[in-house]
Image: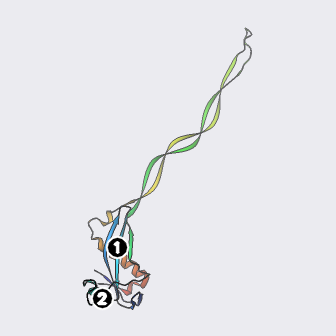
Amino acid sequence: MALQITTEISTDAGNTSSAYIRIVNYSLSKEGTAEFKLQLFKSEEDSLKASLRPGSIGSVDPCKNQEIGESIIISLTKEVDKTTLVKKMVETQVLEEVTSMGPIDQNGNATTIVTQVPKIQIVEQEVETTIKQTVADFSSIQGVDIFTIGYKHLKSKLSELYGTENIKDC
C-alpha cells in the first residue's frame, strides 16, 4: 500500500511530480495516539531501490518534504464525564447561641436570655463535581487493519496539501 502525489513537489533530493509515499511502521501510546512513520521517495522506482540492502549499488534513501513531514499522528481519544468529590470553600449558614443579660426575676436574681442568631461561615466541604476528562479510546481500531486507518488519514492530509485529484492509491 502506498500513495502517489502526481503534482510537482519539492524534496530535499529535488523536485518530483511522481512522489511515492508509504507508511513503514506505527506505534500506539497509552495516552491515545497512533504515530505512523512515513517514507517519501521521488518515484515508485526509487522506493523499490530503497528495499535493497543499504549501501549496496543502486540503493536509494528516502527523501524529505517539509509540508508532509516524517510522520502523521492520529488522536485515539474520547471525552468522558467523571464525577468526583472535590473540597471547596462554601458559605454556610449556622445558628450561633448568644447569651445576654435578662431582667431581674421576682427574687432579685439576674437572669440570662439565650437566643440563636444566624451567622454565615465559610467552611470546607466535599462537593460532588462532574468534569470532562479525555481518555484513550482504541475501539475505532479494533478488528480493523490499522494501516488502512493510517492511509486514510495520510490521504486526507495529502489531499488538503495538494488536492484530491493529485493523490493516487498504489
Q: Is residue 80 above or below residue 70?
A: above
At 36% from the left and 89% from the top, the residue drawn is 6
Among the 4 quarters of the image, the one containing residue 46: bottom left
Disc nearer the start of the sequence (1/2): 1
At 37% from the left and 91% from the top, the residue drawn is 17
Q: Which mark is residue 130?
A: none
Query: Mark 1, residues whose alpha carbon is within 10 Å: few (<14), some, or many (≥20)?
Result: many
Circle 1 or circle 2, nearest the eye = 2
Q: What's under tag 1, amino acid-wise?
A: Phe
Q: Is residue 84 above or below residue 47?
A: above
Tell which residue pokes out farthest to the top in this image. 107
Residue in the foreground of this view, choosing between 140 and 60: 60
Residue picked out by circle 1 = 36
**Residue 100 x %, y %:** 70, 23
Position of residue 17 in the picture relative to residue 132 (left or right): left
Residue in the foreground of this view, choosing between 55 and 87: 55
Is disc 1 placed on a helix, strand or loop? strand
Residue picked out by circle 2 = 46
Residue in the foreground of this view, choosing between 63 and 1: 63
Q: Is residue 170 above or below residue 27?
A: below
**Residue 12 x %, y %:** 41, 87
Among the 4 quarters of the image, the one containing residue 69: bottom left
Residue in the foreground of this view, choosing between 122 and 118: 122
The quarter of the rendered structure image containing the C terminus is bottom left
Is disc 2 placed on a helix, strand or loop? helix
At 33% from the left and 74% from the top, the residue drawn is 150
